[in-house]
Amino acid sequence: MNKFSWYDAASIEEAQKEVNATVSQTIQPDSPENAAVFKASGIDLLDLMKEGLSGPAKVVGIRNIPGLDEISFDPEKGLRVGAMVTLSQISGDDRIKANYLALHQAASRAATPQIRNMATLGGNLAQRTHCWYFRSKELVCFRKGSSTCFAHVGENENHAIMSYGYCVSIHSSSLATALMAFDSIVEIKDKDGKIRLVPIKNFFVLPTVDRTRENILEPGELMTAVILPAPKRNTVSYYIKMGSRKSQDWPMAEVAVVAELSGNVCKSVNVALGAAAPVPLISKLANDSITGKTITEATAAEAGRAAMQIALPLSENGYKIPVFQTIIKRALLAVV
Ligand SMILES: Cc1cc2nc3c(=O)[nH]c(=O)nc-3n(C[C@H](O)[C@H](O)[C@H](O)COP(=O)(O)OP(=O)(O)OC[C@H]3O[C@@H](n4cnc5c(N)ncnc54)[C@H](O)[C@@H]3O)c2cc1C
């Protein structure tokens, strides 16, 4: 791990004045000299630094900035979750459990209790991919500036099955999967103090667009909160994570469903898939398949099959197709 200086910011403005780079930039061969980056709880950042992938000259702590760790809920206006709210806070909040069940479930199932006590929402959304080739200092993969995606021909059982280009990494944020299903908005403060409200579907960046990053954040831009719309009447949600073990690991496949119902008929739905692609995705094929239909074993299974029509599995991850089909079906059946 490199030597670095530490700055404990007391306000957003102070933190933004110090920060001049994103962590993603520090992983590139042309990493800026004297890079100063944000640190929330540091789980992902310190992993990257200890692994020798990122070596910022300065780390700017944002934990002590007041006001970023608050949750507010208004049944008319919706939910606002501060970027420094921890996953434990999200999973322990009764208002979230009652009105945004899939978000509660995603936060409750991520990582381990110890990690959830530290990990923040902002850091969770901005964590880098856990592709094992990307995470190895020795291997300069496509995302780190070479022309080789080792996963394409190597061990790719955890990797993408759809919407990939040459890089087949998957996005690692479980919270993002649930937040996509709720059509959330990411609130970002830029360096001039202006607030940008970005629909979460526009927050993530595919490697076919820019392989050096996974989100739109520019140096010094700070996520301040994520906003979820007010819960609509008769709208129900559900989230399912499948992993190789029950706890302590990222998902192999995950799904979040937010459905507006009339009895058992699906009036509208958002089926979001995580660990399927380099970014979290809404499955339009699944949405179109089930919308307007009564949710039954047969129609839910059909939506799962529809979602997987565009899957292009790699040499070792064909197993993900039946897993996704099953969890999409189960999540749809769970909302009725
Ligand atoms: C064993 C293990 C299992 C895990 N399992 C899961 C899982 O199942 N699902 C899942 O989703 N995650 C999982 N994680 C990942 C974990 O949840 C994230 O590493 C954690 O949420 C990161 O949050 P943090 O506050 O520590 O972020 P940090 O490490 O402090 O920051 C991460 C990145 O976000 C940037 N950043 C942080 N806050 C802001 C902000 N407000 N504005 C702009 N940029 C910001 C930082 O600069 C950095 O680039 C797991 C981690 C481990 C170690």
Image (cartoon, grey):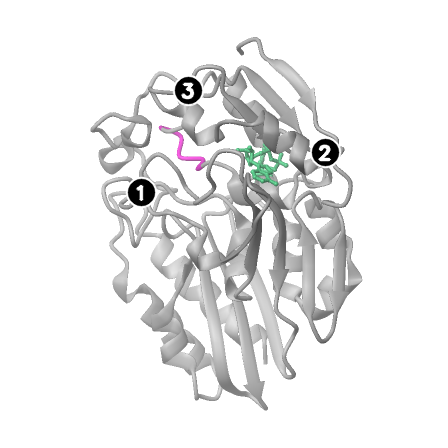
* Picture coordinates of residue 62, whole percent (x, y): 68, 33
Q: Is residue 300 something that shows in the picture?
A: yes
Nearest the eye: 334 or 213 = 213
Q: What amino acid is found at the position of numbered circle 2 in the picture? A: Arg
Neighbours of disc 1 within 10 Å: few (<14), some (14-19), many (20+): many
- Mark 2 vs mark 1, CA separation in Å: 30 Å
Q: Quadrant of residue 169?
A: top left
Residue at numbered disc 1: 207
Residue 122 in the image: above or below residue 49: below
Sooner in the amino-acid sequence: mark 2 or mark 1: 2
Q: Is residue 208 left or right of residue 5?
A: left
What residue sits 27% from the left and 66% below the top?
309
State the mark number for residue 182: none
What residue sits 65% from the left and 46% below the top?
83
Q: Is residue 41 something that shows in the picture?
A: no
* Quadrant of the image where one finds ligand 1: top right
- Mark 2 vs mark 3, CA separation in Å: 24 Å
Q: Quadrant of residue 45?
A: top right
- Mark 3 vs mark 1, CA separation in Å: 21 Å
Considering every residue shown, the one lying at the far front of the view is: 192
Neighbours of disc 3 within 10 Å: few (<14), some (14-19), many (20+): some
Q: Are marks 2 and 3 in contact (CB under 8 Å)?
A: no
State the mark number for residue 32: 3
Residue at numbered disc 2: 63
What residue sits 74% from the left and 69% below the top?
98
Residue 131 in the image: above or below residue 244: above
Q: Are marks 2 and 1 in contact (CB under 8 Å)?
A: no
What residue sits 37% from the left and 29% below the top?
134
Which region of the structure is painted magenta?
129-133
Residue 310 magenta-highlighted: no
Closer mark to the observer between disc 3 and disc 1: 3
